[in-house]
Amino acid sequence: MRDAYKAAYGVVDTTDPKTIYVKIGTWMEAMVDATHQSRHISALKNRIRAHTHLAPFPPYLDRDKHLLFFDVKSTGVRFNKRSFVDLEFTFYNRVPTAVPDTLETDLRAICEHLCAGLDADPEFRFHLTKTSPFVTAS
């Protein structure tokens, strides 16, 4: 996992795993000096959504059926100031019979792909903590 993100993943119900979730937490810093960051945040959410479709989905997950929860307070996002971002993806299992053995590896690959997309964003920079120095991708 990249150094600027905290990630967690799992299943909602282990006896009947219809959904699998991935949570990514990070601190976001605006690199564009704008009075209203909400337009830039909306564009970021759309870029994340588009980048999710390009993720390496394993065959047991439905590529076309997933949810994205993007939580950031747009009023707190300012140039050179950090705000906490919570991303939660919910993926639907095509065959909800059992959790596959490759779940951890598959979700780690999805997380890496999503974080690489965030790292490539020109308008925002991401950090592990509110006060940590900027860390390049490892």
Image (spheres, rainbow, N blue to C red):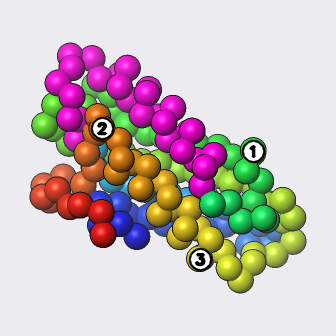
What residue sits 57% from the left and 39% below the top? 50
Residue 41 sits in which quadrant?
Answer: top left
Q: Is residue 45 magenta?
A: yes
Which mark is first along the chain, 1 or 2? 1
Where in the figure is residue 42, as x and y percent of width and height? 44, 26
Residue 115 sits in which quadrant?
Answer: bottom left
Where, quadrant-wise, is the N terminus in this rendering?
A: bottom left
Looking at the image, residue 71 sits to the left or right of residue 30; the answer is: right
Q: Are marks 1 and 3 in contact (CB under 8 Å)?
A: no
Front position among marks 2 and 1: 2
What amino acid type is highlighted by mark number 1?
Asp
Q: Which one is in front, 43 or 24?
A: 43
Disc 2 element: loop
Q: Is residue 28 above or below residue 30?
A: below
What residue sits 87% from the left and 64% below the top? 95
**Circle 1 sits on which residue?**
64
What residue sits 68% from the left and 54% below the top? 91
Q: Would residue 83 be seen by someone viewing this image from the given angle? A: no
Q: Is residue 42 above or below residue 127?
A: above
Give the magenta part as a residue range.
29-55
Where in the figure is residue 34, as x and y percent of width and height? 21, 20
Disc 3 element: helix
Disc 1 element: strand
What amino acid type is highlighted by mark number 2?
Pro
Furthest residue to the bottom?
101
**Circle 2 sits on which residue?**
122
Q: Is residue 97 above or below residue 5?
A: below
Any mark on residue 105, and which? Answer: 3
